[in-house]
Each structure stands twice: as structure tokens, then as C-alpha cells.
Amino acid sequence: MESAVNGAWRNGSAANRFAIEVVQRLRSEGFQALWAGGCVRDLFLGKSPSDYDVATDAVPEQVMKLFRRTVPVGLSFGVVRVLGATRGTEIEVATFRSDGRYLDGRRPEDVKFGSASEDAARRDFSINGMFLDPISGEIIDYVGGRNDLEAGIVRAIGDPHKRFAEDKLRLLRAVRFAARFGFQIETQTQIAMETHAAEIAVVAAERIAQELLKILQHPSRAYGIRLAQQTGLLAAILPEVDRMYGWPQAGNAGTEESSIGQHLERVLERLVPEPGTSPVLGLAALLHELGRDSCDLAPRSPGESPLVQKDHWGAERAGLVGLRLKLSRADCERMSWLVENQAAIERIAEVMPAVRKRLLHHPGICDLICLTRAHAESEQQTTRQVEFAEHYLGTLPEGPLDPPALLNGRDLQSLGIPAGPIFKHLLEQVRDEQLNGSLTTHEQALAWVRNQHGIS
């Protein structure tokens, strides 16, 4: 038993106070109760936990009798959620246990309720295997987690091969924890990760996507992807990205020759998501070079540049990656749009106002600006066009991006134009003229259509 490194385990938040109350209530009935896992790790590192978990020798039925508002979320695993009086305050209370055999690479076939030391031994990494007594502030560490936190190491508890064979998702979680805290992965743990990396394929795509997006949403995203590539996990999850580490990229001004994969890491390092940007922005940045290998192979329209062709093919493939990861349709569409339009802002000042306004009005424009800036900075290129786009959005020098339409289908019918595909074509033409500033009134738009169709 060791003393906590500081007194910050009592921070006065509603969740913190309720977590202490839960422990006190269990102890008042003669049970052992401790804070466990991630909250202990975060408090040791001086961070405020996002949630609190309590481990106890009380079995689920006893926990549910002690607290008025409970939700049995995993009785077979000894887990009960205890709800507080304040909205949003809830604590997961789990019975100390040891796990049985893992048959599906994710969850044990059965569990056996046991002691705190047995509970620590069945957890994933030493930094997640400590307990804290929130009354005295003492840390209870059976697995060397404190030493590893001080050394900045992610180490599997016990035999790392066994830990990863039990639950394949731990492979990605090791990467996420190391990246999040800027830690190194302990040597034997990394060797085991490299050995078992391909086995991540047995994990549901949705769970892989959740872990991957967590890695890519954190400022340490580039380090996380580098670790995934070094351990073989990237090859198992995103083989199309892993291959890019073997593609050379000639250095631009001020940069050394490197691989496309290293270029992607530089983009991720410089990516600074703004409030409201999409959760898949980091993934889009990782996938934005997907069209590279198709650029010289696929036919393209007359006059279409290789870069436009690359972005079109890359957008299709990014969408397929999203489907493989079982992302939502909206997330897949956002990723595809970002990849296809990644170079659009580089031409934003030169295009017609209609093209500029349609681009800047898109709901993904903040994501696109972030991606374009990161790409330019990663290659030490100018960000002048990005700044132009931001200034334009702030001042709207050519009027609103999405003004009310000047015409609709009923207007075209009133001119004697039969309903059909021509409606959409005409309305889009009128819209372009309006956004370009050539048409500003309803009457001007009607006159323009009459002139186009020879209507007197």
C-alpha cells in the first residue's frame, strides 16, 4: 500500500463526490470498496477523470439492495451502474473477479468473483490495474502500475501474449494509451503486439473504428499512427495506408525525401481541429492520399488534371474504408467529400464566385480548411489561400453564400416550359448566375430564362 502522490483525488466535482459516497456506503455495510482502473491512473497523472469506477467484494445483488437507483449492465460479469441524484452522475460498481477462458477474442466465457489482487491481475495494462482508497488517499498497486506511470511505460499485466490472446482489442488500446500519454510501449509487450497484430481482424469493425477514431481525435494522433504502423496493426486495419509507408515522396522546399506515410504523419501532427469539426476529420487526413496509386492508371476526362483524378479516386476509396469500418453514412460522405475537395481551397481565390460560394457553404468547410492548412504547413507551403477562405467567410464580400433562390419550378411552368429534367438544369444555371452576381432579382431571372429559350 502506497500513499497517493498528491491530494487531488478529491476535486469537488459532482461525479467525484458521488464516487466517494458510493465507496462510503459500501464500507458502511462491511464491504471492501476502492476506486479502480482509469480514474486512478488519471488522478496519479494529475488529470481529472472523465468517469469513476468502483471495485468491491460486494456481489451485484448486494450492490442493488444498497442503492435505490441502479441499472444491471452486466450481472454475469459483476457490473452494476449506480445512478446519482444529480443528472449525469453515475458510477459503475464491479465485483472483484478473475476471468475464465476467452473463446471469442473479446470476452471471457465466465468469471469468478474473488479478491482485489485477482481483479488487478486480470486487467490489461499495469497503468490501468491500480486501486485507490478515496477516503485515505492510499494507492493499492499489485501490478507495478505506479512505477510504469513514473517511467512512462505501457506494459501488459503478466504474460503479454496471454493478455492479447484473451482480448484482441487490447492491441489497439495499447497504442491509444501510449499515444495519449506520450508513453513508450514496453519491449516484451510490443513484441507480443507485433506477433498478434493480424488477430485484430476478429474484433467487430465498429469497436475497431471507435478505438481508431479516439486515437485520431487526440493531439498525439501522429504518434499513435506511427505506433500502429510499427506494430503491424495499421497493416491489419488500414492496409491501403500502411502501403504508403513504402511509397517515396520527393521533398518539397525545406523537407527531406520521405515516404507518403511519413507525409501523412506530418499532416496529422499539424492538424488542429476547430470546435464543431467532424469526428472523422483525423481519419480523412489519414486517408487523403488514397488516390495516389490510381493517378497514373485510370482513364480521365479530356482536360482533367492528374490531381483531380487522384482526388476523385481517393474519395471513392475513402468511402469504401468508411463502409468497411461500419461508420455512419454521414461520416462516410464527409470523408469522401474532404478527400475529393482537398485541393479546392488551393484555388479558392481564382474560381468563379458560384464555385467559391458552393464550396464555402458546404457543412464540411471547417474540416476542409483544417485539412488544407495542415497539408500546407506539413510541406512548408503557403497558407495564403486558407487565409483568403477564412477572411471571405468572415466578411462575405460578394454577398451571402446561400441567398434565397430567385426561381422555382412553378416559375418555369408559368413560362410554358414543360416539367422534366430541363427544370433542374435551368434552375442550376440560374443559381450559378445569381451566385456570380449576374442576376439579382426575380424579374431578371425570368428574363434570362426567356432569352435562353427564345420565349417572348
Image: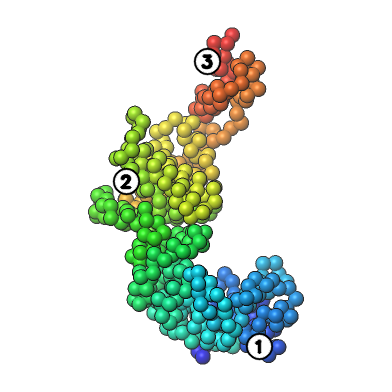
The answer to which of marks 1 and 3 sits earlier in the sequence is 1
Query: Which residue has dot 2 on it?
Result: 293
Whether 202 is drawn above or below 16: the answer is above
The answer to which of marks 1 and 2 sits earlier in the sequence is 1
Eye-nearest disc, 1 or 2: 2
Q: Secondary structure at mark 1?
A: loop
- Residue 365: percent from the left, percent from the top? 49, 44
Query: Which residue has dot 3 on it?
Result: 452
Q: Residues within 10 Å of mark 2 (few under 14, many from 20)?
A: some
- Residue 150: percent from the left, percent from the top? 42, 80
Query: Viewer-proximal residue, 247 or 196?
Result: 196
**CA distance separating discs 2 and 3:** 44 Å
Amino acid type indicated by mark 3: Gln
**Image position of 26 (left or right of 389):** right
Which residue appears at 49% of the width and 86% of the height? 141
Q: Is residue 292 visible?
A: yes
Amino acid type indicated by mark 2: Asp
Whether 41 is drawn above or below 367: the answer is below
Which residue appears at 50% of the width and 89% of the height? 2
**Image position of 443 (left or right of 180):** right
Q: Secondary structure at mark 2?
A: helix
Which residue appears at 43% of the width and 73% of the height? 164
- C-beta proximity under 8 Å, tags 1 and 2: no
Q: Quadrant of residue 157?
A: bottom left
Question: Residue 31, which numbered label?
Answer: 1
